[in-house]
Amino acid sequence: MESRKSAPAAHSTDELRDELALANRILVDHGILDAFGHVSARNPDDPETFLLSRNLAPGLVTAEDIQVISFDGTAHDDRPSYLERFLHAEIYRRREDVHAIAHSHSASIVPFSVSETPLRAVWHMAGFLGTAVPVFEIRDSVGSGSDLLVRDSDLGRDLASALGDQAVVLMRGHGFAVVGDSLPQVVARAVYSDLNARAQAAAMQLGGFTPLTEKEGIAAAESNNGQLRRAWEVWKQRSTT
């Protein structure tokens, strides 16, 4: 279960644009994003808006590509926006504790979105996953003929409802969305969600797995949160050299 925390120390909008461009590159470096997917941050100057790149491959994103978007999905400039900006908008609207969101089509995660085996924390680095990651089934909202994209506010609200107070929600046949109280936290959670999925799948091939208990997950997540800057700094260095 996601813990409720006070907001992190605010950045200026310009600083956050630079950090958001960096987050895109880091997630591409780790294979979490490729030509698709996106990462956003709540706007410190107006918490009812958020920062998200214009419609562009994540590896190409610079600070100049970042748009300001309102919770109704309206961009504050006339450049094309991502179709799934509503995914971000409705999670921010529902979750005041969330200050960053990433959405990925990770091939390691997708199998857990379409099978009867839940994704669970099996590794202390992914304790935030808890005892069972929820799955958003888009058919429950729009039937069996959609393209599986969160294209409007109604679908965004349904996804946010499926996420609830958790850190991660899987999207059946699509990927996952992960939230955090900062860009360093959401980047780390995206990376370790993917790696945990790989570890769980490998353990299942060996005959089974032993998941973390709820208390182990909470304790591990709290411990790792205190070390986020260490991961962020080394990932930052690798993505800029």
Image: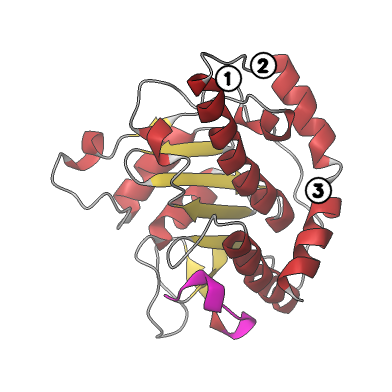
Going 39% across and 57% down the picture, which residue do you hit?
86
Magenta-drawn stretch contains 213: no
Residue linked to disc 1: 131
Q: Is residue 25 left or right of residue 233?
A: left
Going 59% across and 85% down the picture, which residue do you hit?
64
Going 22% across and 37% down the picture, which residue do you hit?
139
- In contact (CB < 8 Å): disc 1 and disc 2: yes
Asked which secondary structure carries label 1, the reply is: loop
Q: How dense is the environment of label 2, judged by Cα within 10 Å: few (below 14), some, or many (20 and up)?
A: some
Residue 172: give x, y in percent of width and height: 33, 38
Boundaries of the magenta span: 55-64
Asked which secondary structure carries label 2, the reply is: helix
Q: Is residue 42 visible?
A: no
Residue 152: give x, y in percent of width and height: 30, 56
Asked which secondary structure carries label 3, the reply is: helix
Magenta-drawn stretch contains 56: yes
Residue 23: give x, y in percent of width and height: 65, 64
The answer to which of marks 1 and 2 sits earlier in the sequence is 1
State the mark number for residue 228.
Answer: 3
Going 81% across and 48% down the picture, which residue do you hit?
228
Residue type highlighted by circle 2: Glu
